[in-house]
């Protein structure tokens, strides 16, 4: 359902949210290792997150990637997905028709529209900060054991 890029973006953001709880920054290699992602790919994902204001980066000896304290409390998974994938997942027709709607439905519209709405609601309601807390409590995991 989500691209690899989006999966890694979510994982990287959750990892950085955990670090934010400890007021720490992380470099690309550390993040890549934590989320089982190639370094170069992780760097590209992080650049996209920085571009969209989800993550901040600082260069230099004490530099690294982090999430601003004022950003973390309201940051949702939807913001990450939209930053990486665009809003097509939660707005577009499953068959790619431009004019699909309740008035002009595609063959799958009546079945897919409620699923799409549920996905939108789920992504809007999942706060990165809450998920980071669950990670810290070992209730959820970023990589397979």
Image (cartoon, rainbow, N blue to C red):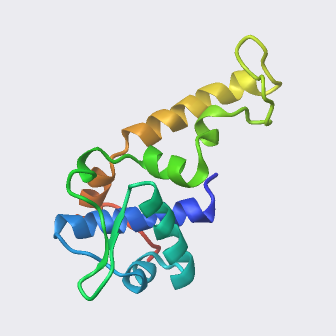
Q: Position of residue 42 (x, y in %)?
A: 51, 75
Q: Position of residue 90 (x, y in %)?
A: 59, 36
Q: Visible in this render: residue 74?
A: yes
Rendered view: 12 above or below 134 = below
- In the picture as drawn, the residue positioned furthest to the front comes out as 60
Q: Is residue 129 left or right of residue 92?
A: left
Q: Position of residue 24 (x, y in %)?
A: 21, 74
Q: Is residue 5 left or right of residue 138?
A: right
Query: In percent of the image, x 58 and y 40: which residue is there?
Result: 87
Viewer-side residue, 73 vs 56? 56
Q: Visible in this render: residue 138?
A: no
Query: In percent of the image, x 57 and y 77: which residue is there?
Result: 41
| Quadrant of res 29 | bottom left
Rendered view: 88 above or below 145 = above
Image quadrant where one finds the C terminus? bottom left
- In the picture as drawn, the residue positioned furthest to the top comes out as 103
């Amino acid at each position: 359902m989500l691209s690899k890029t989006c999966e890694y973006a979510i994982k990287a953001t959750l990892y950085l949210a955990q670090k934010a709880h400890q007021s720490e920054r992380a470099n690309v290699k550390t993040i890549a290792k934590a989320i089982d992602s190639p370094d170069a790919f992780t760097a590209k994902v992080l650049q996209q997150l920085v571009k969209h204001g989800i993550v901040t980066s600082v260069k230099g000896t004490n530099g690294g990637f982090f999430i601003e304290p004022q950003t973390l409390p309201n940051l949702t998974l939807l913001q990450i997905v939209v930053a990486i994938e665009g809003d097509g997942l939660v707005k577009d027709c499953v068959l790619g028709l431009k004019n699909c709607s309740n008035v002009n439905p595609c063959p799958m519209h009546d079945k897919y529209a409620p699923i799409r709405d549920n996905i939108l609601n789920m992504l809007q309601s999942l706060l990165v900060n809450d998920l980071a807390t669950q990670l810290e409590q070992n209730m959820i995991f970023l990589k397979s054991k």
